[in-house]
Image (tube, rainbow, N blue to C red):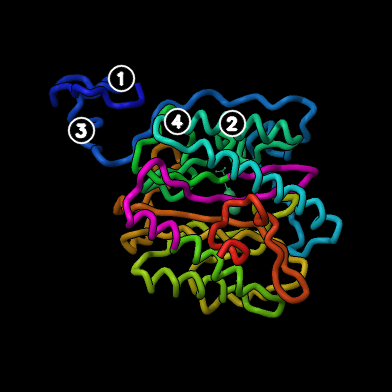
Amino acid sequence: MSQAPEVLPNKNDPCWCGSGKKFKRCHLANAGRVMQGTISPMRYVPDNIIKPPYAATGNVPNTRESAIKSPEVIERMRVAGKAAAEILAKAGELVRPGITTEEIDIFVHDLTIQMGGYPSPLNYHGYPKSVCTSVNEVICHGIPDSRALEDGDIVNLDVTIFLNGVHGDTNATFAVGNISDEDKKLMRVTEECLWKAIEVVKPGMLINELGRAIQIHAHENNFGVVRMFTGHGIGETFHTEPQVLHYFDKFDSTMIREGMTFTIEPMITASGETAHKTWKDQWTAVTADFSRTAQYEHTMVVTADGVDVLTAGPGAVSPSAPWNR
Ligand code: MF3
Ligand code: CO
Ligand code: CO
C-alpha cells in the first residue's frame, strides 16, 4: 500500500505499508518526510531505438568530448532539446494528488520511445528508471516508485532524451494540488535563479559569473544553494566539460566560448541549508535538514553575442522566461 489508511495502527503494531516494521519505527517516525515506495523492475526499450553506450551495461565509458560543438552537433541538439522540453511539459500536466511517480515514469518512458529517443537516465551508472522524480526535501535523483503524490507536495521532474546521438536535458518543479505560499516562493525564486544565470551567458565571460548570479538571488531571499550537484557540459555525452557551479568560486577560471553547450540547473533550499545526505539506494539526495528544495534546468548553446536556450521556447515549462513575463 502506498497511501496511509484512514485508521492508523497502534504504535507497536506493524506499519500499514507492509514493511514488516513497527508503525512507530516506520511511517510514524518519518511523519512529514518522503519515504521510498516500491521500485518496479527496469523497463524495456525496443531494439530499433539507438541507445547510448551505457544502456546495456550501466557502465559509462570515459569519452572525452570537446566543450565546443560543431554546427552539425548543435543542430541535432536543438532537436533533442525541443523533444525534452515537450516531454517535460506533457509529464508536468500529469502531476496531481494520487498519481504515483512510477506512473509518471511510464509516461515519460513511452513518450520518449514514441519520439524515437532513448530515456537517458535509464541505466546511466545503473540508475533504474527513465526520469528523476524528486519530491519535497529530495534535492535530485529521486527514483520513481509506488508512492502517490500528495496534496501540498512539490515534485521536480528531470527529463533527458538521447535523440540522434545527442542528449537534451531539462527539468522543472511542479505543484501537487494546493501548495503553501512558501513553496510557491521557493519555486518562483529558483526559476528566477536559473534565468538570472542564463541572462549572464556570453562568450568571453568567466563561467563563475553564473554561480555568482544564482547565489546573489538565492541569498537575497534567505534561501540556500546546494553545492554537491552542478550543471554540466552536454552533447554526445550526458555529462561532460565544463562543470557549471551554482555558487561563486573565485578560483574557477573557465571561460565561456561560442559553441559551448551546457546545462544550468540550480537546486535551492528553503531553509538556507547547503548540505545533503544520500538514501541507502545510493541515488536519492535529500537536504540534510529535510528542508524543501526546488530545481529548474535548461540545456543551452553559447552564440556569438549571448545564448540560445535549446530546451525553452513556446510550450516549455518556463513561466518566468523573458517571453512569458
Ligand atoms: N538529468 C540529470 C541532470 O540534470 C541527471 C540524472 S542522472 C540519473 O544532470 F542517472 F540520475 F538519471
Ligand atoms: Co543536467
Ligand atoms: Co537533468
Residue stretch in magenta: 159-188
Tell me the kind of residue under disc 2: Phe
> How far is mark 3 from mark 2, CA to CA?
32 Å
**Mark toward the start of the polypeptide (1 vs 2):** 1
Residue sitting nearer the eye, 28 or 192: 192
Residue at (80, 51) in percent of width and height = 76
Label 3, secondary structure: give it.
loop
State whether residue 240 appears in this view. no
Question: Which residue is identified by label 1?
Answer: 18
Disc 1 element? loop
> How many marks are shown on the rendered structure?
4
Question: Which callout, 4 or 2, points at the residue further toward the start of the chain?
Answer: 4
Crowdedness near tag 2: few (<14), some (14–19) or many (≥20) residues, C-alpha within 10 Å: some
What residue is shown with label 3?
28
Mark number, residue 126? none
Residue 45 in the image: state x and y as whole percent: 69, 27
Give the numbered dot on residue 107: 2
Mark 1 Cα shell of 10 Å, populated few (<14), some (14-19), many (≥20): few
